[in-house]
Amino acid sequence: MNKLTHPVKRILSVWYRHFMVYTSNLLSNGFPPFFEPLIFLAGIGLGLGQVIREMDGIPYLDFLASGLCVSTAMMTAAYECTFGSFIRLEYEKIYDAILAAPISLTDMVVGEILWAGSKGFFFSFAVLLVVSLFGLLRTPWAFFVPVVGFLTGVMFASLSLFVTSFVKNIDHFSFYMTGFLSPMFFFSGIVFPTSSLPRWIQPITEVLPLTHAVRMVRGVVFERYQAIGWDLVFIVLTITVFGTLSIHGIKKRMIQ
């Protein structure tokens, strides 16, 4: 009996392939998630923290740190499923090699997305660990932050892989990174609450995926459960829609 008969085994084999590649350079790959939040907290958090004591009823450094936990999950999943996936698809021909094994294209795409979600889990955990050393986010509910990081990673992996399915040149990812993800960082409530924005912008922030991840992680950490249900529904719907579009998009691209 073929060991890859079961779809879960096929998906996990893709995940395991990426895990082995990533951990082959664990020190260099694991360095950024621990160092980058230190830089951000020192450069922005500690400076503004002296001026702004509270934001939205939360100590400002805690407010900022909770947002960083999911923004780092967003960025790592986005890079993994844009530049990383494009290189595997176009330059290294890793997708061709994977599909030469008894693995379907759907298994491969789901494996890619789950791997990026796992990196979101690890990176948000790393940020949580660092900010905890500063005495931040030490509530028992912080235990669930990496879970939100995983969902955030899966959501942006699905969205990013959909973008990858139609991008023809690796340089074109600049439109997605600089034109979409970077502005979203500032308009999704990480640095300041979206309620402080002009009224005409606030409805736009509600369609930004990161807004729901940020609100969900704060809802968990600071026990503000009012909107978690809707945010979770939004994230699941986004994963479902863009995950499906990614499968169809990658399939169409590889056939062409």
Image (cartoon, grey):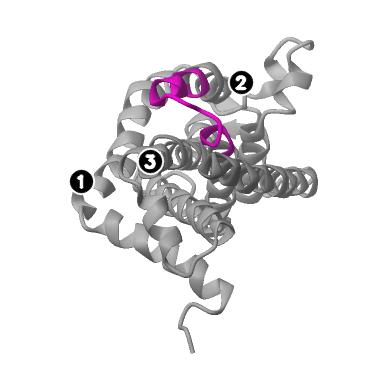
C-alpha span from label 3 to label 1: 16 Å
> Residue 241, position in %: x, y?
72, 44
C-alpha span from label 2 to label 1: 31 Å
> Residue 218, position in %: x, y?
62, 42
Marks 3 and 2, the one that precedes in the sequence: 3
| Residue placed most toward the observer, 155 or 135 | 155
Quick check: 165 above or below 51? below
Disc 1: which residue = 28
Q: Secondary structure at mark 2?
A: loop
Disc 3: which residue = 84
Residue 31 appearing in the image: yes
Q: Amino acid at mark 2?
A: Phe
Marks 3 and 1, the one that precedes in the sequence: 1
Q: Secondary structure at mark 3?
A: helix
Disc 2: which residue = 187
Quick check: 240 above or below 180? below
